[in-house]
Amino acid sequence: MSVLQELYSLVIEGRAGDVPGKVQQALDEGVPPGQILNEGLIAAMREVGRRFEEGEAFVPEMLIAARAMSAALSILRPHLVEGGVEPVGRFAIGTVKGDLHDIGKSLVAMMCEGEGFEIMDLGVDVAPERFVQAAQDGAHIIAMSALLTTTRSNMRAVIDAISEAGLRDKVKIMVGGAPVTAEFATEIGADGYADDASSAARKARELLGKAG
């Protein structure tokens, strides 16, 4: 088994303590950082996403795989930068104002990081102005999460604020969360909707024309 196959398996199994050493081994063996990212990490996270969507894996398995991927990136990221490997895009994500739920938002962020995005995690209870600032700071995608029906309407306020700032044509806007539907996303003028973290990562790439 090659070092990349071993890394792929370690990420899927969520063995966060073992992946940094395996990444370093791959680097020491002269494997290009971009190849480690694509064939080791992104491929593994896509497989985890596939298993989730087909009911073969669940949120805990996704979380531990995402944490393992993050541990791998902590070693790999400086080499990607040094090697000129550009992120797919900048992905800003936050839970809307009035909503303090974090798990879904964080899982989407980790899955998108696993797809090669640079993540701007805005946290929870995020005011529209902070989303606008992220757009001004170069985010290509603005993603919003809500778990409460009462806070869902704040997504519309964010889109309005981005439009008023003259930035609506500069970013793609995604929404998701328990009370959010594809119909609601269309109604408020969002560009995309995802009902789970795996499909969110895929949708993000599609919105930037980089589906893979």
Image: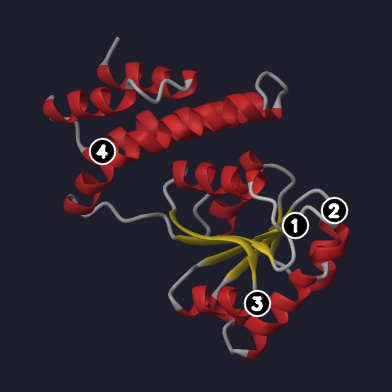
How far is the residue under mark 3 from the one under mark 1? 13 Å
User: What secondary structure is found at the residue carrying circle 4?
Assistant: helix
Residue 121 appears in the figure: yes
Q: Which mark is residue 146?
A: 1
**Residue appearing at x 27%, y 15% in the figure:** 2
Quadrant of res 27: top left
How far is the residue under mark 3 from the one under mark 2? 19 Å
Counting residues from the start of the chain, the first of labels 3 and 1 encountered is 3
How would you rate the neighbour count of disc 3 (Cα within 10 Å): few for under 14, some for 14-19, many for 20 or more? some
Q: Is residue 27 above or below residue 9?
A: below
Counting residues from the start of the chain, the first of labels 4 and 3 encountered is 4
Please state which amino acid type lies under the numbered disc 3.
Answer: Pro
Q: Position of residue 12 (x, y in %)?
A: 48, 22
Tell me whether the residue at label 2 lies in contact with that at label 1, contact meaning CB atoms closer than 8 angstroms.
yes
Q: What residue is shown with label 2? A: 179
Counting residues from the start of the chain, the first of labels 2 and 4 encountered is 4
Is 39 on the left-hand or right-hand side of 168?
left
**Residue appearing at x 40%, y 38% in the figure:** 70
Q: What residue is shown with label 3? A: 128
Tell me whether the residue at label 1 lies in contact with that at label 4, contact meaning CB atoms closer than 8 angstroms.
no
User: What secondary structure is found at the residue carrying circle 1?
Assistant: loop
Quadrant of res 61: top right
Q: Position of residue 165 (x, y in %)?
A: 59, 89
Please state which amino acid type lies under the numbered disc 1.
Answer: Ala
Q: Nearer the viewer, residue 8 or 137?
A: 137
Please state which amino acid type lies under the numbered disc 4.
Answer: Ile
**Residue appearing at x 60%, y 68% in the figure:** 172
Q: How is the image coloured?
A: secondary structure
